[in-house]
Image (spheres, grey):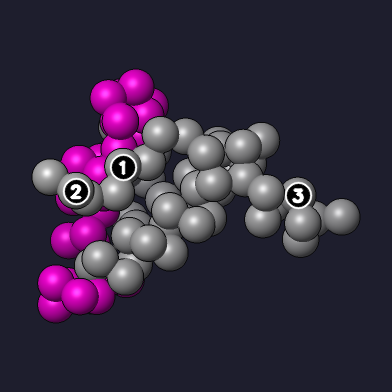
Amino acid sequence: MGAPVYRGAEVSKFINIYKSISSSTGTNPAAQDVTPIFVYYCSEIILETINMMYHQLRKDWLRLKEELKDAFRHTDSRVYMYTR
């Protein structure tokens, strides 16, 4: 209860929040063990989408972050800011 939930907007910001959460719990944010836990910080609709992503299935967090940024780029202000 009280944990942040990703609902589909500002994916870059949420990835940074998730990195902070992972670091504060003693988990290596770059390790594969953070990948399966990420979906529990997502809304139900987003969870279903992420569970079908290739790098989620492979448990590859570094590539999953890029896949997430690409999939949700239309709702991410940081993507617009740095791609012009």
N-term mark: 3 or 1: 1
Q: Is residue 39 inside the magenta stretch?
A: yes
Q: Is residue 72 left or right of residue 50?
A: right
The span from disc 1 to disc 2 (Cα, nearest Å) is 9 Å
Marks 3 and 2 in Cβ contact (< 8 Å): no
Mark 1, Cα crowd under 10 Å, few <14 / some 14-19 / many 20+, is some
User: What's the mark number on residue 80?
Assistant: 3
N-term mark: 3 or 2: 2
Identify whether 72 is placed above or below 22. Answer: above
Q: Is residue 27 left or right of residue 71?
A: left
Q: Where in the figure is residue 79, as x and y percent of width and height?
A: 69, 52
Mark 1 lies on a secondary structure that is loop
Q: Residue at x 37, y 41 (%)?
A: 6
The part of the image, by quadrant, that contains residue 30 is bottom left
| Magenta part of the chain | 23-50
Q: Residue at x 32, y 70 (%)?
A: 20
Identified by mark 1, the residue type is: Val
Q: Residue at x 23, y 67 (%)?
A: 22
Question: Total of numbered circles in the picture?
Answer: 3
Name the residue carrying label 2: 2
Q: Residue at x 50, y 57 (%)?
A: 13
User: What's the mark number on residue 5?
Assistant: 1
